[in-house]
Amino acid sequence: MITNKTSSSVRLSNVHKRYGDVVAIDNLSLEIQAGELVTLLGPSGCGKTTMLRMIAGLEEATSGDIFIGNQNVTHQAASYRNVAMVFQSYALFPHMTVLENVCYGLSVSANMRKAEQKRVALQGLDMVGLAGYESRLPSELSGGQQQRVAVARAVVLEPEVLLFDEPLSNLDAKLRRHVRSEIRQIQRDLGLTAVYVTHDQEEAMAVSDQIIVMRAGVIAQSGSPSDIYEKPNSEFIADFIGDANVVTCQVLSSNNGHAVVELNGAQLSTQFTGSVSNEARLAVHPHDVSLSETPVENSFPGEVLQATYLGKHVEYDVRTDAGALFVVDQQTDTYFQRGTSVHVRISDGKSVLLPIQ
């Protein structure tokens, strides 16, 4: 039976990785608890895949230490680390059946008879919803089914740490939502320690216990999905997570993490951490901005530059004296057309005053 008996913590201590003069990872330290799913999130070139490959043993740190459980594996080859990776490209053997692909890792790394390998592999396929597919070749499966085979192949090894390298990037949007839910359910059911790399913010929010946002080889912010989304610590985080609007405002008063600010003549309450000055930057999520034909309390004028109907919501680009705003409106029965004069209101208490950089 597949269990979570081997799940371990992961710890990186003052890790550097350089390629010549290029610094990929810069003095990075972090700890992932056993049984957690932690996502490394960031734009291309931020170092997230490099960090995943160092945990896997596919890259060696220039300096610093990497621990899996209590064991220092910094200089240990990948074949000696009890980790498994699910790749973006699936990495299935095209000439092997589904069952043979799942059995492959067991035949190489586990001291297990063939009958037991088959039993465990079939259990893994059943876990990912592919019971009855064991005789098919990868070419006879859809992309989502191939990725499930790759997940089963990794899970049956009962690794200390399960690594995901952008596993859903080759799937369409609807299938991504379905497969990510399956991955999260399997991880929770088995109590697996998992490190998940993606550049997709929504995907990271959906699957993670903790998110580590990276930028230029360092950790820009880490925390729960709600903390990262609702309490960004910089303009970069606010913009990268949730497409927040960032505008300049005047601080009228501040006390105990709450402030009253003025934005284009409107006053609103907001939250903050750190310190603030008289002039500050305010982060506002698109769905916390509303538009109306007539003035309402604490609204200010704007003009619709672009309106995009997307079925479940309408996206607006709005010009105001405070700056350009991106607005998401769930009202789709009627919506404002390009060139329409509107009044803009930001929901009270929903914005975040960003720390002074």
Image (cartoon, rainbow, N blue to C red):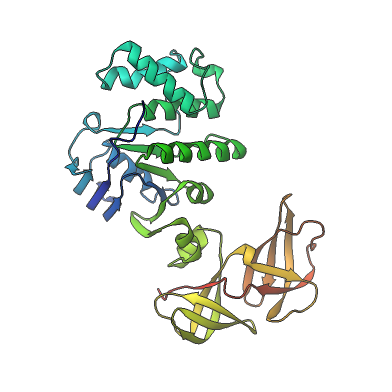
Q: Quadrant of the N terminus?
A: top left
Residue 61 in the image: x percent, y percent? 22, 44
Q: Is residue 310 left or right of residue 11?
A: right
Residue beneath the point at 62% across and 73% down: 323
98 in relation to 60, above or below: above
Left or right of 174, for residue 34: left
Give whichever of 111, 336 is nearer the camera: 111
**Which quadrant of the view contains residue 228?**
bottom left
Give the residue at x 38% y 15%. Answer: 118
Furthest toward the right, the residue is 334
Q: Nearer the viewer, residue 98 or 113?
A: 113
User: Left or right: where does residue 61 sit relative to residue 314?
Assistant: left
Is residue 312 among the parts visible in the rendering?
A: yes
**Observer-nearest of 70 and 322:** 70
Q: Is residue 62 at least partly visible in the picture?
A: no
x and y percent of residue 253 in the render?
50, 87
Quadrant in the rendering for residue 111: top left
Residue 322 locus on image (x, y percent): 62, 76
Q: How many marks?
A: 0
Image coordinates for residue 287, horizontal then vertical, percent = 64, 63
Outermost residue to the front: 1
> Splitting the image into 4 quarters, where does residue 298 fall?
bottom right
* Residue shown at 79% from the left, 66% from the top: 339
Position of residue 213 relative to residue 121, above or below, is: below
Quadrant housing the C terminus: bottom left
Q: Is residue 196 above or below residue 116?
A: below
